[in-house]
Image: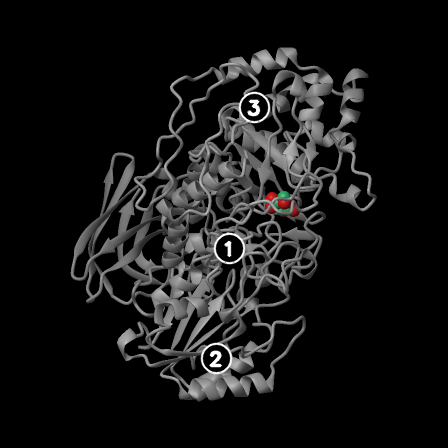
Amino acid sequence: MTKPIRLLGLILLVASCCYWSACDPAPTPPADDNDTIDIEAEIDSLMSQLTLEEKVRMIHASSAFTSGGVERLGIPELIMSDGPHGVRHEHGRDWIKDEGVRDSSTYLPVGTALAATWNPELGYAFGSVLGSEANYRQKDIILGPGLNIIRSPLNGRNFEYLTEDPYLNARMTVGYVKGVQDQGVAACAKHYVANNLEYEREMVNVEMSDRALREIYLPGFKAAVQEGGTYTVMAAYNKFRGDYCAHSEYLLDTILKMEYGFDGAVISDWNAVKNTMEAVNAGIDLEMGSDLPMLATGNVDYSKFHMGDTVVTLVNNGTVDEALIDKKVRRLLRTIFRVNAIGERAPGAYNTPEHQQVARDIADEAIVLLKNEGLLPLNEGETQSIAVVGANATRKHAGGGGSSQVKAYYEVTPLEGLQNLMGDKADISYAEGYVVEKGGGSNSDLIAAAVEQVTQADVAIYVGGYIHGYSDEWNDNAYDAEATDKPDMLLPFGQDELIEAVLAANPNTIIVLMGGGPVDMQRWQSQAKTIVQAWYPGMEGGNALADVLFGNVNPSGKLPMTFPVKLEDSPAHSLAVTGFESLEQDYTEGIFVGYRYFDSYEVEPAFAFGHGLSYTTFTYENIAVEKKDNTVVVSVNVTNSGDRDGAEVVQLYVNDNESALPRPAQELKAFQKVELTAGATERVEFTLGEDAFSYYDDTQGKWVLEHGTFTIKLGSSSRDIRQEGNIEW
Ligand code: GLC
């Protein structure tokens, strides 16, 4: 489908260098156009022709998901769509869902699942699918990736994000952004910054030290800008140090645009702009979503936005310098040209087997084997009967969670996946086990039925965990969902009682948990021989889970966040002094987020950051650490010492033996995922720059590298260190 070509001869070179030697069938970028234009010259030309009224029309929404265009000059609206793991269904121009359109799309695994692969090449493939389907759906901007640091297990939107660690956040973001943008679509790094909970998200004010800001919460966005080249960034709802993020000159101008060199457009979260003068003076370039409060009145008027017609009046009466508006318009025009919104849009592809294969590949590598005392892998030939228990075995998740919802083209549930793989080889029974209902507790009849079933089967598989909401509607977002946080870490719907009963009936029951993050497993973790974390694994998740359970796929997933034993162990709930439900959020735990806290304060997690088992084993030998000019080269032999091919994520942590300011016990500074056939050995090498040893000294306002001894740790997780070596810097 072609957008009308309104500016003659405008054909863009869409950067199509494929970012990664993609190991997956990532959609190839659209062919380069040979003709290129000088975008800045085109912008200059349009700026000289635009009237003030036309400029102001461009800096606010023209509908639910479009920015204002200027028909007279052939400047199109920018068309946006959620979300981070699939192109959302059509919303229409005024939040009235378009019916009868072809808007069921590829439902990819969620952000935490992608991060659990620790595979940046899959990040690129993920982004490529998203960009290709956005093209097909005629979208210029896909509103993802979600980069907010996973600070508390309770945050409702953790599932949309990636990790607790800034380095892993950056690595997984860059490929994603480049994958989207190599398709000619803009990515949108969100929500900038410190939107780490959903409680009163439009009112909460976040305070934190400069160290925490620079070392933990900004690096993902910095990488999105400076390495990923993201065309847009979304300003978060919350306040930061008293200013709304959408009005913060410190965040938007000083850091993002001036220090990081971001030259794209800052889009507000929907209805995040609250004040005209603050928005005009700060680096917010496009106001979206201020129609939301108008919907209830039945009178939506886009000219009445904070950056609407009132700005024309303010410029004309000399209150506002038109140059401020020009700066915003230039960035929007730059985005319009970059996404080729004027020229021939790439056709994209939709719901293709290739896209579904990428979803499957990511799910395969995302599933984390947390514990395995001999039950897995299952043997297809020896399995005559399988008892499947749990409502999440048949539940579909794509449509829930809020704005990240996807109308999935299909979604294979865990039960369907097992039926697909084993339906003709084994008798598969199913018992619901628990009921998904608001405030629902355990159900003794369902428990009795489940117990009877698992007692008689060769294999028992429990599938439980969290859900997004009770339906696909906003008003019952319950657990892993937008605009709500979890009440606690406990499994809902009486699952603990059910799991205890099922394990008592059949100790060989395999426990599979779905969800965006950890649950409190204290009541049954020691009884369970095998525990698997499956996240929300996307449309192919059921097939991937079956393949992992039966060993067709050797699990290689690693936790991208710490799983605490209990909520009180989490630093956001122990070290931080402000309660979680408080409009004043002071991140007093500072840089001690996730494993940085657990390792430094010697708190034992249920499962550590970076943890994930395999069906084979890996040994690490002969570490070497040597200084080469301004780098440190670290190498180690990794051997697949088992009898099955597999992939290992070799993680490199750095410990600063002595520092002027407190530093975490260790910090992830590199990793590599290596695939090794049984018995094979590979020498894995890392080259570390000064940044791997530096920290942000907020007493001096700069990054510092102090001389002294650093310990390099190589391991299979943050708590499974296999080799160490020291270096003097
Ligand atoms: C929502 C979300 C944001 C989403 C936007 C548009 O409130 O915070 O992530 O992209 O509005 O739906």
The quadrant in which residue 32 appears is: top left
Q: Which amino acid does the dot numbered 3 rest on?
A: Pro
Dot 3 alpha-carbon crowd within 10 angstroms: few under 14, some 14 to 19, many 20 or more: few
**Mark 1, residue position:** 593
431 on left or right of 68: left
The quadrant in which residue 243 appears is: top right
Instruction: Tell me: residue 318, above or below residue 250.
Output: above
The answer to whether marks 1 and 2 mark residues whose Cβ atoms lie closer than 8 Å is: no
**Distance between mark 3 and mark 2 Cα atoms:** 61 Å
Camera-nearest residue between 222 and 186: 186
Q: Please name the residue shown 45% across and 88% down the image.
A: 505
585 on left or right of 712: right
Q: Which amino acid does the dot numbered 1 rest on?
A: Val
Give the mark, 1 or 2, whose residue is nearer the N terminus. Answer: 2
Give the total of numbered labels. Answer: 3
**Distance between mark 3 and mark 1 Cα atoms:** 50 Å
Dot 2 alpha-carbon crowd within 10 angstroms: few under 14, some 14 to 19, many 20 or more: some
The spot of residue 74 in percent (x, y) is 61, 19
The spot of residue 491 in percent (x, y) is 56, 72
**Mark 2, residue position:** 524
Question: Extreme front residue here?
Answer: 100
Tell me the quadrant of ligand 1: top right
Q: Nearer the viewer, mark 3 or mark 1?
A: 3
